[in-house]
Image (tube, helix red, strand yellow):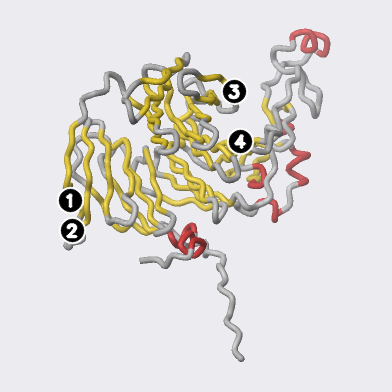
Amino acid sequence: HVTQPQPTIHSRPQTARPVLLNKIEGHSDAVNAAVLIPKEDGVITVSEDRTIRVWLKRDSGQYWPSIYHTVSSHQNRVSDMVFSLESEWVVSTGHDKSVSWMCTQSGSMLGRHYFTAWASCLQYDHETQHAFVGDYSGQITLLKLENQTYSIITTLKGHEGSIATLWWDPVQRLLFSGASDHSVIMWDIGGRKGRTLLLQGHHERVQALRYLQLTRQLLSCSADGGIAVWNMDAQREEAPQWLDSDSCQKCEQPFFWNIKQMWDTKTLGLRQHHCRKCGKAVCGKCSSKRSTFPIMGFEFPVRVCDACFDTIKEEDRTALATFHEGKHNIAHMDMDPSRGLMVTCGSDRIVKIWDVTQVVGCSLATGFSPR
């Protein structure tokens, strides 16, 4: 009797990278979106020149446009759109500062809500009819949409820049947001405790996100072509809120606006900084060291106070994300996890198709073999 060995998913080597399979060139303007066609060697692109193109892979291995369609119905830029088969709605956001939803059967507009800033991105929960809308003010609004009406459930504030991308995972009820402040935030909507995790590893605006539920990995892409793969299965901690103080919470020297203490102690005021690990307000002298601290999402060295620096062990600095170069501007990204494929596009008018099986191991997790 021979027992079959159990399949194991080996930890991926650090050298594993996305492998570029194809480049699609031929757009006359920036490519705003590119989507992989399921079960086909094809890509649909939407360009700034208002064209929608379907590219199919020929026997030569090159992608050629087989359908070319010019859209002229929009008065203002549509920033994001979701089609819901369950409710038979198309929900869209745009630079007219609104989110609107219309019935696909009748073609009639069902409702519209206006924001104070451009609505930049959208996610939709088909089961509960909740819409998440990110805007240029850095807020995310959660709305409950009805047939002829709607209600605002809450607004999420945490980013210091405009929201560029959202991703909703309906299984774990997690919302991920990427913004111009170079950071990603995970909002635990289902946990009801308001838990948020900050992820900082990009050096430019985060413009695309995708959470892989099966492998508990988050992919994020930034405008400079950076592609990050975050291990969300790891134990992580919330970064602390920054504390307010009129003087350094370590040496008690006054900050420069604390005129009274400066006068009383005959000392010059100091500039205020914050320790990323404890959140305390500290002066430069008491926070002279830098460290990564991946458990709180800091994948590159950040300011920590001297006391916190001494508590960080070498194993605490173990990276919980890997970083890769897309080598072009990435404004949008789509994935087909079953085939381990990713497509990226941006303002350089180039569309790139990648094999990411070595990076995310998704083909192993879903039972599909790499092509």
**Identity of the residue drawn at 67% across and 27% down:** 273
Q: In the image shown, does 185 or 269 lie closer to the viewer?
A: 185
Disc 1 secondary structure class: strand
Q: Which residue is mark 4?
A: 187
Asked if marks 4 and 2 touch (Cβ < 8 Å), the reply is: no
Question: Which one is closest to the eye, mark 1 or mark 3?
Answer: 3
User: Could you tell me how far apart the alpha carbons at marks 2 and 3 are, in whole angstroms?
Assistant: 48 Å
**Identity of the residue drawn at 81% across and 23% down:** 252
Number of residues whose C-alpha sits closer than 10 Å to that of mark 3, classed few (under 14), some (14–19) or many (20 or more): few
**Identity of the residue drawn at 33% across and 56% down:** 39
Q: Is residue 359 visible?
A: yes
User: Could you tell me how far apart the alpha carbons at marks 1 and 3 are, in whole angstroms?
Assistant: 45 Å
Number of residues whose C-alpha sits closer than 10 Å to that of mark 4, classed few (under 14), some (14–19) or many (20 or more): many
Q: Which residue is mark 3?
A: 153
Q: Most extreme residue toward the front, as rendered?
A: 106
| Res 302 → quadrant | top right
User: Could you tell me how far apart the alpha carbons at marks 4 and 2 are, in whole angstroms?
Assistant: 42 Å
**Identity of the residue drawn at 55% across and 19% down:** 151
User: Could you tell me how far apart the alpha carbons at marks 3 and 4 are, in whole angstroms?
Assistant: 15 Å
Q: Which residue is mark 2?
A: 58
User: Could you tell me how far apart the alpha carbons at marks 1 and 2 are, in whole angstroms?
Assistant: 7 Å
